[in-house]
Image (spheres, rainbow, N blue to C red):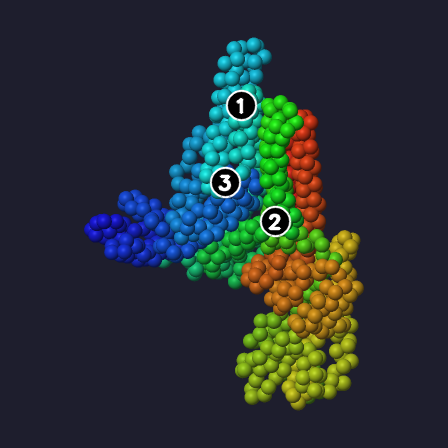
Amino acid sequence: MDCADCAARLEKAVASLDGVMRSAVNFATAKLKVEYDPAKLHRGDIISQIKKMGYDIAAAGGPGNKQETVLRLSGLDCADCAAKLQKAVEKMPGVDKANINFAAATLTVEHSTNIQSIIKTIQQMGYQAREEGAAEGAVPSFWVKNRRALTTVVSGIFAGAGFISGWFNAPENLVITLFSLAVVTGGYFPAKAGFYSLRRGFSMDMNVLMTIAVVGAMAIGQWEEAATVVFLFSLGNALEAYSMEKTRNSIRDLMDLAPEEAVVRREGREETLPVSEITVGDVVIVRPGERIPMDGKIIYGQSAINQAPITGESVPVDKKVGDEVFAGTINGSGALEIQVTKLVQDTTLARIIKMVEKAQEQRAPSQRFVDVFARYYTPAVIGLALLLAVVPPLFMGQSFAPWFYRALTLLVVSCPCALVISTPVSVVSAIGNAAKQGVLIKGGAYLEGAGKVKVAAFDKTGTLTVGCPQVTDVVTMPGYTKEQVLAAAAAVEVRSEHPIAEAVLKEAEKLDVHFSVGENFVSLPGKGAKAKVDGRKIYIGNLKLFQDDLKLDIKDAAEILLQLQREGKTPVLVGSKAGIWGIIAVADRVRESSYEAINKLQKMGIQSVMLTGDNEGTARAIAGQVGIDKVKSNLLPGDKVQAVKELQENYDSVAMVGDGINDAPALATANLGIAMGGAGTDAALETADVAIMSDDPSKVVFLIKLSKKTLEIIRQNIVFALVVKIAAVMLVFPGILNLWLAILADTGAALAVIANGLRLRKVKI
């Protein structure tokens, strides 16, 4: 930048972009500062505008200023090569850290250098990359988009022509020319990628190994072998890329759930806008049969909403004014007006997508063995290949050509791609399948951990029961009326968010009981609550509060309490320090799927335990209905943590299933924390290792079944990949395995492992 007037024009050009709030060029330091709305504009669009004006970015973020950029990759079909790509990027000047997510085909880079130079390096190594959120640009032509597949076809045609010419005794020069053309067309992209792989860090990826093998084969006159190897390698890459695309579709399917545009009412008129331009408070109009574009609350209309894309529920849920709805769900037969409560990047669906991608980054425990094996396997086999090429001819008087050929064959089987991909492809398929069923698993470790669970501890309220208790009885003590007891209870509970508080308030409203709002409300976790009502301190809570804390004599109420508990009801005492005024009994309804879930877990050899803050009588009554034998009641949040620890002393692995809010400490303590009812509950999404988006306990059964199947398939994949590799290496020495069979073994093993892992996309309850 050498012209002050041009700098001013650049400043205006950037400021004209939609979404830019402020643009300021410092001509003296050659810096541009831009304040912009990321919901409307991507950083890449600003860089594009600068380049259109004839300038470049010397160092994104400024020299020494680190930033993190996520790049979307395409053409990534080999897990081992992906690891080599990561190392090459990490060695670039100005790159501090690079982390590749092979499953999601993304690369996260911490850098102070220009991101375009990183993208250029990636392209040189044979892959395509663009910044996350940046427009994909012009749609490539058919020939450009499918250039690798087309070169594979052309290579196959030349190789086939070479074999046919040889069979018909054509001139040798013609046969060699045809095979050479097959090598050049099919091997151009792999050779180019291999060259840059070596240049960027002497990384021996499969492209390098294949190129060395092909050049070596041609050097000793094995033209038909070289052409066959190139064609099979190119074909294998194309098939692997196709298979991995199917695996990655688990994320793409989620991304496609929410529409890109929505009808919005602003200032009395309707207009269609991109969802990125919709703000909190806007009103979107959703017609029957349409997908809901944003998270929000219904302000007009009612309908049955198909929430399966988010929660996995098979039956549509009736929604009315005031109810919450989620982006990506499907409206039924009613027209709705929805007030937006979250921006597009903050919707429940967007958070699910981010969590699924992040989960796929995390390595499962079984991956550790694979990584260690691969780290030593490739260098060891390459070293063995060198010995095979040198030792027999020099020290044993053997002919050079056959041993050199065997060394080349050994090089080809030294890439551990099938083994490296064996675990991630299974984990990705399983996590993607679970997300579609409304079960969010936060990583491979938790997926594998679910299959090792020996005992499942369940919270009662909101987990095994509906969590919406109703008042069944109001029993008064001498000197007090039903209205007085309800009014006092409602005055305290009006400030509470507990499900029992909601039941008390509904009953007061139903009976038209008038009450004043309590002052100085204090929640007493695990016991109840208190507040000042009309100058008197009123308490509402369980027996522990009145007997242990207030030191009241409860003998007059004891028989009533026992009777209510025997009936499976939860008694709530109301009173003051002077005495008990009355007892309000509430009862919760057991979820329809609770009994079936507990029964299936027991058949799988998993013991179930109930941990609840409710009284023993009510807890036992509910436990009897769902088939749980072991119950621990009257537990405070800290007591649940201790109960989980005690279970861990007796069992190898303990899962805790709760609502993700009250049970947060216990969820964190357990080997596997499972939060139920995660849709719309931030605490559930953040606290647990697994979040079940619906209120269905049977999803716990699905999770464990999926985990066991995943562990089984991972074991199958690892054993298969190891057997194929070891067998291939052993068959090289006697000369049984030739080059093209080695490529078939390598590619075939990888494809078989991917296909086996893809089976996890179909696992159901």
**Mark linked to residue 431:** 2
Closer to the camera in the image, 516 or 253: 253
Where residue 3 sits in the image (x, y, percent)?
21, 49
Q: Residue at x 48, y 25 (%)?
A: 184
**Position above or below: 734 against 44:** above
**Farthest residue, direction bottom:** 578
Whether residue 198 sits left or right of residue 707 in the image: it is left
Where residue 253 sits in the image (x, y, percent)?
54, 45
Q: Secondary structure at mark 1?
A: helix
Q: Amino acid at mark 2?
A: Ile
Q: Residue at x 54, y 80 (%)?
A: 517
Q: Secondary structure at mark 3?
A: loop
The residue under label 3 is 202
Q: Amino acid at mark 1?
A: Met
**Mark linked to residue 218:** 1
Where residue 525 sits in the image (x, y, percent)?
63, 75
Q: Quadrant of residue 521?
A: bottom right
Whether residue 484 is visible, yes or no, is: yes
**Position above or below: 154 against 606:** above
